[in-house]
Amino acid sequence: MPVAKRIKSLRESKGLSIRALAEACNVSPSALSQIEQGVTSPSVATLEKLAHGLRLPVAAFFAEKEEGSALEIIDTGSCPSFSLRGNAEITLLAAQQHTSGFEPMLVRLQSGGALAEQPFLVGVESEFVWIRSGRAQLYYDGNDYEIETAQSVHYDPRRNHNWQNPYDEACEMLLVRQR
């Protein structure tokens, strides 16, 4: 099921109108309507806001939850990947069968890419990022920080932040968000 239809289906399953979800997520109702109609693609920041408002992991927008055993081995080569606005791609590494207190994803930022068009905040208390390759710039609470290969950062995403790649080479990072 396409992301736009899944967002609409999840919203409706929670009994929320477009306006109610938009208000809960600090997104305009018209933007949410355009996303649900497939007119525009959501940024990572908007997906995070919608997931928080629906009290679901971002992975819920991309994959069906399946029931299964207490153990789930995840083949990262077959995890769903999605290109988003801002020259960003995410690969969801979260378990599809289990609900946990964290949500891991692999983020690829091409040269000139960013997670969002402007700084944003998320309603969870903790986020961890480890740079697997390349380097990225973290805008956090009014300051810029260069984070390089093998460095990691832990921060409170309830403050204005954004990840961008102003460098020539692509950057790949592991982002783990508290749920």
Image (cartoon, helix red, strand yellow):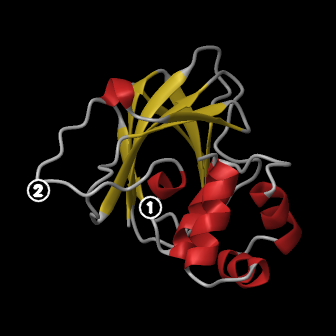
Distance, label 2 to label 1, CA atoms, is: 19 Å
Q: Is residue 142 visible?
A: no
**Residue located at (13% from left, 54% from top):** 69
Task: Name the disc covering residue 57, or none.
Answer: 1
Q: Nearer the viewer, residue 92 or 38?
A: 38
Above or below 105: residue 64 = below
Which part of the image, by quadrant, shows the C terminus? bottom left
Task: Please tell me whether residue 92 is drawn above or below residue 60 in the rendered image.
Answer: above
| Structural crowding at the residue carrying mark 1, measured as other residues with C-alpha within 10 Å and reported as few (<14), some (14–19) or many (≥20) | many
- Residue at x 56% of width, y 76% of height: 13
Q: Quadrant of residue 142?
A: bottom right
Instruction: Tell me the residue that label 2 is attached to.
Output: 70
Give the residue displayed 83% in from the left and 73% down from the top.
Answer: 29
Q: How many labels does the image show?
A: 2
Q: Is residue 2 above or below residue 166?
A: below
Q: Is mark 2 on a helix, strand or loop?
A: loop
Looking at the image, is mark 2 or mark 1 earlier in the sequence?
Answer: 1
